[in-house]
Image (tube, grey):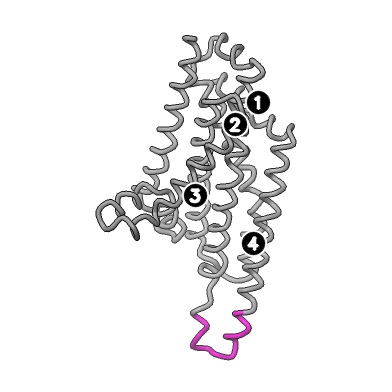
């Protein structure tokens, strides 16, 4: 356990010591702040319009106009940034030979992979913490549903964890960070849009593809509907890609 924590701490510190980490963090803060400001302005304009109509007051609420759009936009931002955060996890170590030192140490491949993965998740968690002042303003603007807000944070973290697991596997297959970036983004984008396939594929295959897609599961959580099946989906998804990465790293020992 100490080895996993040491690797995780090294990876987390590495993000704060590289331009890529700060660039991703700065971009995340700027974009989430921009989208929140835009949603807040739209909400304020709509509130002014319905102020004179008491029957339309219930149509304007924080959940529909601020919480859902904000976390939906945050998910798209993470879709673009997570491949950039994971592209160096193994590709850089393979390029500079650091992976040989890790494999020669008395640490299992599973500990190496899990340590790097937890370190990357630690940086993502820090990124999500930067949105707390924004969501905290919702309590100043009105009375948001705390349950929905917590469910949205859970959904966003599980979604980001899935993104990072895919990116880590892509990084383990190449020594080029650019190739890892493009490959992971392409795979994540395909998994993201699978939920739209039911329009083309029909009821049978379409329902299956929709169930495999991340978007259909995260939408339920963002609505405050905490279903065990959705949580199991994300945990299984992350476990599958972490296991696949472990097998890939283990294969390096036999070269």
Residue underneath mark 4: 35
Q: Which residue is mark 2?
A: 119
Residue 48: percent from left, percent from top: 63, 83
Instruction: Tell me which residue sits at (62%, 68%) in the image.
Output: 39
- Would you name the residue on which mark 3 appears? 154
- Compared with 224, 124 (above or below) is above
Q: Position of residue 42 (x, y in %)?
A: 62, 73
Residue under label 1:
10
> Distance from label 1 to label 4 (Cα)?
32 Å
Is 82 situated above or below 88?
below
Outermost bottom residue: 52
In front here: 225 or 80? 80
Left or right, 143 with reference to 243: right
For the point 49% across and 9% down, the residue is: 255
145 inside magenta stretch: no
Q: Quadrant of residue 143?
A: bottom right
Q: Is residue 199 above or below residue 117?
A: below
Q: Give yes or no for contact between labels 1 and 4 (Cβ–Cβ under 8 Å).
A: no
Label 2 neighbourhood size at 10 Å, few (<14), some (14-19), many (20+)? many
Please tell me which of labels 1 and 2 falls first in the chain.
Answer: 1
Q: Are marks 1 and 2 in contact (CB under 8 Å)?
A: yes
Between discs 4 and 3, the one toward the N terminus: 4
Contact? badges 2 and 4 (CB < 8 Å): no
């Amino acid at each position: 356990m100490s080895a996993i924590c040491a690797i995780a701490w090294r990876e987390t510190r590495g993000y704060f010591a590289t331009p890529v980490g700060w660039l991703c963090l700065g971009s995340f803060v700027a974009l989430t702040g921009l989208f929140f400001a835009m949603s807040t302005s739209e909400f304020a304009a709509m509130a002014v319009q319905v102020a004179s109509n008491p029957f339309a007051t219930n149509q304007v609420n924080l959940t529909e106009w601020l919480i859902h759009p904000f976390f939906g936009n945050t998910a798209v931002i993470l879709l673009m940034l997570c491949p950039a955060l994971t592209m160096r996890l193994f590709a850089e170590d393979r390029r500079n030979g650091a992976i040989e030192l890790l494999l020669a140490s008395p640490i299992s491949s599973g500990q190496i992979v899990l340590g790097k993965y937890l370190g990357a998740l630690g940086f993502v968690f820090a990124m999500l913490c930067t949105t707390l002042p924004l969501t905290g303003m919702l309590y100043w603007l009105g009375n948001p549903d705390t349950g929905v807000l917590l469910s949205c944070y859970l959904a966003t973290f599980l979604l980001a964890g899935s993104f990072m697991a895919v990116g880590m596997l892509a990084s383990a297959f190449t020594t080029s960070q650019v190739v890892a970036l493009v490959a992971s983004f392409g795979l994540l984008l395909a998994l993201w849009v699978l939920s739209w396939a039911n329009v083309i594929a029909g009821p049978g295959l379409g329902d299956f593809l929709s169930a495999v897609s991340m978007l259909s599961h995260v939408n339920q959580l963002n609505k405050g509907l905490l279903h065990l099946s959705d949580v199991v989906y994300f945990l299984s998804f992350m476990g599958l890609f972490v296991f696949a990465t472990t097998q890939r790293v283990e294969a390096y020992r036999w070269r």
